[in-house]
Image (cartoon, rainbow, N blue to C red):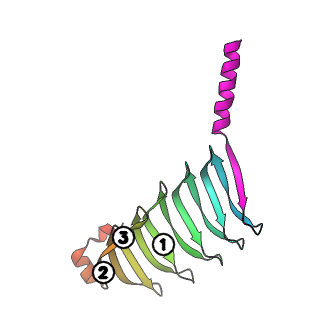
Amino acid sequence: MKYALLIFCISISICGSIEKEYKKSYHANGKLKAEGWVRDGKRIKYWKFYHTNGVISKEGHYKDGKAVKYWYFYRENGKKLSEGHFLEGQKCKWWLFYDENEKVNHKCQLKDNQKNGYCLRYKNEELVRAEKYLNGKKIGEWTDLASFKKENSIWDLR
């Protein structure tokens, strides 16, 4: 009987620690600040965050308290600001950055929250320049396809 009670208590404490809970927090003005799932004090699954005016500021997934998968970021007026991938809380892979009219301003390859690879710059939705970065430092720039192809492989843009 003692062992049965002990096993019952242990199983309840284990089950209690793996339960998830939906949380909301609020700005000082009473508007929603953030909402999403928490397990063991860490953010998990899908979360949304809001500017103080109530407009969504960012949304994406967490795993064990770290941003993962694809995220979206918005300006205070609700227009897109940027979007891209996270891996264990760090920006990685291709990211898109938008101007005030939600047109792509530039696309960059990121690793560990910094430019690392190519960055394609646009003006009026036309490609005007390609840049290459290594650990956040610009190491190359091209303004025409011929010179780019001379020094780079198109396959690196994947």
Q: Name the spot of residue 140 as percent of width and height, x first.
A: 28, 77
Real-space Cα separation, disc 3 to disc 1, in angstroms: 16 Å
Q: Is residue 125 above or below residue 74?
A: below
Whichever of callouts 1 and 2 sits on the residue coming sooner in the sequence is 1
Q: CA distance from mark 2 to mark 3?
A: 14 Å
User: Where 134 falls versus 120 (above or below)?
Assistant: above
Q: Which residues are magenta?
A: 1-28
Q: Quarter of the image holding residue 153?
A: bottom left
Q: Main secondary structure of the magenta part?
A: helix
In the rendered image, residue 129 lying in the magenta stretch gets the answer no
Q: Are marks 3 and 1 in contact (CB under 8 Å)?
A: no
Q: Residue at x 60, y 51 (%)?
A: 43
Horizontally, residue 108 falls left or right of residue 89, namely: left
Disc with the residue nearer the chain's start (3 vs 1): 1
In front: mark 3 or mark 1? 3
Q: Alpha-carbon neighbours of circle 1 within 10 Å: few (<14), some, or many (≥20)?
A: many
Q: Which residue is mark 1?
A: 96
Which amino acid, mark 2? Glu
Task: Residue at 69% x, 16% y: name it.
Answer: 4
| Viewer-closest of 106 and 35 | 35
Element at badge 2?
strand
Tag of residue 141: 2
Disc 3 residue crowd, few under 14, some 14–19, many 20+, Cα 10 Å: some
Task: Work out whether residue 58 or residue 156 is closer to the camera in this orientation and state it.
Answer: 58
Q: Amino acid at mark 1?
A: Leu
The residue singled out by tag 3 in the image is 136
**Residue at point 31%, 67% (across, down):** 156
Is 66 drawn above or below residue 53 in the view shown?
Answer: above
Q: Earlier in the sequence, mark 2 or mark 3?
A: 3
Q: Position of residue 103 (x, y in %)?
A: 52, 81
